[in-house]
């Protein structure tokens, strides 16, 4: 079979076009998965705490979305499916315990770290029993928050992470 210059060019363009389309679709899929999975939601009604947590998470290389109340947090979680939630327990309207219970009742097992000024075993136990994966008390050391975030993000999902699931 003999190919003329125009036939060869057309076939080459078709193969190149097919390759580029497949390659483009592959990267769109993987980059969109990466960008969706690099989102961390921080929920706190105190502006200073929200700013501090935001800076820590951004320094770790993740995208941040913030919410100041439980109702907004639930909407954002449903819409953006973040890879991790940092959740204050004392929130207006819907508190953090009700947020986490709502998530788990609706089979949403996004990892949640309670980051709260409520100290003591009673509050920690309530948050963990409701479905939080970790509990960090304020004021926290930045290293402690960083460690908790990295452990939640880099640990493979396990049934042990979802005691109430």
Image (tube, rainbow, N blue to C red):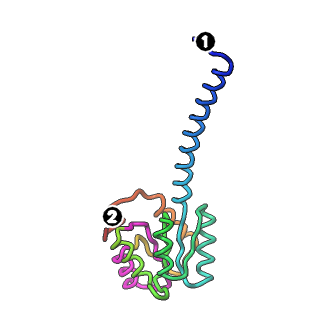
Is residue 54 inside the magenta stretch? Answer: no
Q: Going by the picture, which residue comes out furthest to the right? A: 5
The image shows residue 4 at horizontal and vertical percentages of 66, 16
Q: Nearer the viewer, residue 36 or 3?
A: 3
Residue contact between numbered discs 1 and 2, judged by CB atoms under 8 Å: no
Relative height, residue 34 to residue 162 (above, below): above
Cα–Cα span, label 1 and label 2: 65 Å
Magenta span: 108-131
Residue pictured at 39% horizontal, 66% vertical: 109
- 11 left or right, relative to 100: right
Nearer the observer, 43 or 106: 106
Work out which quarter of the rendered image holds the C terminus and state it: bottom left
**Residue beneath label 1, please?**
2
Q: Residue 106's spot in the image, x, y percent?
A: 35, 71
Question: Is residue 118 positioned above or below 51 on the image?
Answer: below
> Which sits in the foreground, 100 or 120?
100
Tell me residue 152's x, y (percent): 46, 64
Q: Nearer the viewer, mark 1 or mark 2?
A: 1
Q: Provide residue 38's location: percent of width, then percent of height.
A: 54, 60
Tell me which label, 1 or 2, sits earlier in the chain: 1
Q: Which residue is mark 2?
A: 160
Image quadrant assignment for residue 95: bottom left
Residue drawn 58% across the image and 74% down it: 53
**In the rendered picture of this protein, how many numbered marks are placed on residues?**
2
Classify mark 1: residues with Cα within 10 Å, few (<14), some (14-19) or many (20+): few
């Amino acid at each position: 079979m003999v190919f003329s210059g125009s036939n060869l060019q057309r076939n080459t363009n078709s193969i190149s076009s097919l390759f580029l389309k497949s390659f483009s679709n592959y990267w769109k899929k993987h980059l969109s998965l990466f960008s969706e999975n690099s989102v961390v939601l921080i929920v706190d009604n105190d502006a200073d705490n929200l700013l501090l947590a935001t800076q820590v998470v951004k320094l770790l290389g993740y995208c941040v979305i913030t919410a100041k109340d439980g109702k907004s947090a639930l909407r954002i979680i449903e819409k953006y499916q973040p890879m991790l939630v940092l959740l204050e327990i004392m929130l207006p309207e819907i508190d953090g315990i009700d947020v986490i219970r709502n998530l788990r009742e609706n089979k949403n097992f996004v990892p949640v770290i309670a980051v709260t000024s409520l100290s003591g075993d009673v509050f920690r136990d309530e948050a963990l029993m409701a479905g939080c994966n970790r509990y960090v008390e304020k004021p926290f050391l930045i290293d402690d928050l960083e460690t908790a975030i990295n452990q939640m993000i880099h640990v493979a999902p396990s049934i042990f992470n979802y005691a109430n699931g």
